[in-house]
Amino acid sequence: MNHSSPDAHERAPSRTPMLIGGIFVLLGGMFIGALTTTVLLRTSIGSAGDLKAREAIRLQELIEAPDGRAPAAVTAERATAQFAHSFVISAAALDATASQEDRARIIAISRWVLDTGALAERGDAVSRWAVIAARCVVEHDDAVREAAVCVRDRMPLDVPVPEHARR
């Protein structure tokens, strides 16, 4: 005698609704991922655009004169002063620089500043601090944290403190 169970004659429930639901979830995830990626890319491109705009504004200030472009001696002086200022800031924040390539480049620039005496003849405080910063970076080229602390600790007393840092 062959007894079959009542369940054997019933059909298994259809998995089609679950399959359709899974496809919708997958498509929804792809849509959200694409949208998120688009927003993130736009944000990063916008940030790069902002940085380039600020850079162009700063560079225009270096060549600006009431009647157009400033004479070469004036632009060279302005560019050198801006370089000294930017170099001190980057040397003081060397430990926060993420790129190994940028760190290596700042160390190479430090050696260049010391080897050539590029800023040595200038009498302004920022240029003197840039030379001090270069010495710190070269002395501690294998320990960027110590180099950055050295730059901050050896600031000349006659360097003007920015208004926002006085509080």
Image (cartoon, helix red, strand yellow):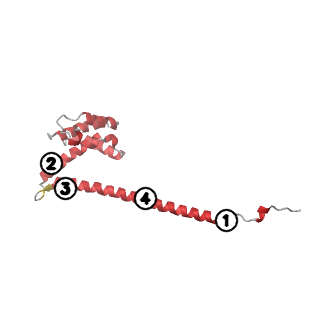
* Numbered circle sitting on residue 77: 2
Q: Quadrant of residue 25?
A: bottom right
In the rendered structure, are the residues bearing label 3 and label 4 in contact, judged by CB atoms less than 8 Å apart? no
Q: CA distance from mark 4 to mark 1?
A: 36 Å
**Above or below: residue 158 compared with residue 14:** above
Q: Position of residue 86 (x, y in %)?
A: 24, 45
| Pair 3/4: label in front | 4
Residue situated in front as seen by the camera: 55 or 5: 5
Q: Tell me which residue sits at (18%, 34%) in the image.
A: 157
Q: Is residue 27 left or right of residue 15?
A: left
Q: Earlier in the sequence, mark 2 or mark 1?
A: 1
Q: CA distance from mark 1 to mark 3?
A: 70 Å
Label 3 SS? helix
How many residues crowd around disc 2 within 10 Å: few (fewer than 14), some, or many (20 or more)? Answer: few
Q: Earlier in the sequence, mark 3 or mark 4?
A: 4
Q: Tell me which residue sits at (59%, 65%) in the image.
A: 20
Q: Which residue is mark 4?
A: 37
In the rendered structure, are the residues bearing label 2 and label 4 in contact, judged by CB atoms less than 8 Å apart? no
Q: Tell me which residue sits at (56%, 64%) in the image.
A: 23
Q: Which residue is mark 3?
A: 60
Q: Position of residue 21 (x, y in %)?
A: 58, 63
Q: Which residue is mark 1?
A: 14
Q: Amino acid at mark 1?
A: Ser
